[in-house]
């Protein structure tokens, strides 16, 4: 199995999200993982012609039409989303979304949209979820820690999307990381999430990658 494990993302709430309707918005969150990968698919079309001519002997002439190969894009990107919260720029979703992880370096993007009925949904910003700090802590093998232990703290910087200090905590046999993500490509807005790694039976796992 190529899958390393699962990532559970608890989308808790939005904070001061942008207004996209008259006085408010109808926001929902999407999580995408991976990119579109191009692959070549053989769509060969052949025309077989047989001509029988009998002059003392019988022979066959076969003509094959030229093979053409079309390049098609095969989507390898996962996408999951929350429900829509009507008329609220500080929505509470409290939903769990789960994606599978094949590549620890594949981008995981959180996007917020305003749901529209008659037109396309409006963008309300986006942020990237960095799972590397959580993965590094899991690989340390710290299962004997007491509940509530803060294993690591990650500070906001220009290299991440954090709006505040993010803590990785060991509690009840699980390692989780709480984040408040500052949305970009928008005038304002933050989203609070928690991520948790889930080992999948039969998968490669983190220690073998």
Image: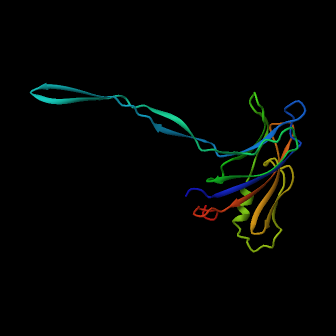
Q: How is the image coloured?
A: rainbow
Residue 72 image point, x, y percent: 53, 35
Quarter of the picture containing the C terminus is bottom right
Q: Residue at x 19, y 26 (%)?
A: 52
Residue 67 image point, x, y percent: 39, 31
The quarter of the picture where residue 184 lies is top right
Give the vertical position of 201 relative to 186 (above or below): below
Q: In the rendered view, does 195 fall on the left or right side of 54?
A: right
Marks counted in the figure total 0
The quarter of the picture where residue 150 lies is bottom right
Residue 20 image point, x, y percent: 84, 32
Give the vertical position of 142 relative to 96 (above or below): below
Give the vertical position of 48 relative to 3 (above or below): above
Q: In the rendered view, does 34 fall on the left or right side of 68?
A: right
The quarter of the picture where residue 205 lies is bottom right
Quarter of the picture containing the N terminus is bottom right
Residue 167 image point, x, y percent: 82, 60
Front residue (pair 102, 152): 102
Q: In the rendered view, does 137 fall on the left or right side of 58?
A: right
Q: Residue at x 34, y 28 (%)?
A: 47
The residue most toward the left is 56
């Amino acid at each position: 199995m190529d899958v390393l494990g699962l990532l559970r993302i608890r989308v808790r709430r939005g904070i001061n999200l942008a207004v996209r309707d008259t006085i408010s918005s109808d926001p929902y969150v999407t999580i995408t993982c991976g990119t579109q990968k191009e692959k070549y698919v053989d769509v060969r079309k052949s025309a077989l012609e047989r001509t029988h001519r009998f002059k003392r002997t019988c022979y066959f002439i076969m003509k094959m039409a030229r093979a053409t190969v079309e390049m098609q894009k095969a989507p390898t990107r996962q996408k999951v989303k929350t429900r829509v919260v009507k008329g609220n720029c500080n929505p509470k979703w409290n939903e769990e979304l789960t994606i599978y992880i094949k590549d620890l370096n594949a981008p995981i993007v959180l996007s917020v949209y305003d749901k529209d009925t008659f037109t396309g949904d409006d963008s309300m910003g986006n942020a990237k979820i960095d799972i590397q700090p959580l993965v590094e802590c899991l690989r340390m093998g710290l299962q004997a820690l007491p509940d509530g232990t803060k294993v690591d703290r990650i500070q906001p910087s220009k290299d991440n999307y954090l709006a505040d200090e993010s803590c990785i905590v060991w509690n009840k046999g699980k390692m989780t990381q709480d984040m408040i993500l500052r949305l970009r490509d928008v005038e304002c807005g933050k989203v609070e999430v928690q991520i948790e790694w889930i080992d999948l039976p039969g998968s490669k796992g983190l220690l073998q990658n």
